[in-house]
Amino acid sequence: MNPRLIEATYAGGYLIRLAYDDGTSGVIDLESELWGEMFEPLRDVAVFRSFHLDLELQTVVWPNGADFAPEFLYERVSHRSAAGPNR
């Protein structure tokens, strides 16, 4: 099981800064993931930045119901953290 997501903040464009309870943190760029019926509306930056952290689901969620699997987000952040400094 992945560590718990404790913070998600908008970082500009299609970037979200995530922080986990194990100390893992970083900025992920989701622009290339915004395709398909649920995610295409998020290409509007005003809509994209309307996400909120859902502590029960352990992910970020948008008003239209779009979300990413918690494992996907953690993997993206932890690999980026291991590779070096984040944006």
Image: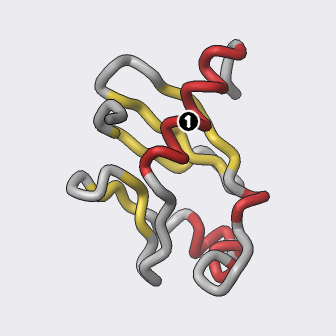
* Residue 27, picture quadrant: top right
Query: Horizontal and vertical percent for residue 41?
Result: 65, 82
Q: Quadrant of the C terminus?
A: top right
The relative height of residue 19 versus residue 14 in the rendered view (above or below) is above
* Residue 11, picture quadrant: top right
User: Which residue is the extreme one toward the front?
Assistant: 1
Left/right of residue 52 with respect to residue 13 in the rendered view: left
User: Which residue is the extreme one toward the left?
Assistant: 56
Query: Horizontal and vertical percent for residue 45?
Result: 67, 68
Seen from the viewer's position, the closer of residues 60 and 2 is: 2
Query: Horizontal and vertical percent for residue 83?
Result: 71, 16
Left/right of residue 16 with respect to residue 61 in the rendered view: right
Seen from the viewer's position, the closer of residues 43 and 58 is: 58
- Tell me which residue sits at (68%, 54%) in the image: 30
SS label for mark 1: helix
- Tell me which residue sits at (61%, 72%) in the image: 46
User: Which residue is the extreme one toward the right?
Assistant: 32
Q: Which residue is mark 1?
A: 75
- Tell me which residue sits at (54%, 63%) in the image: 49
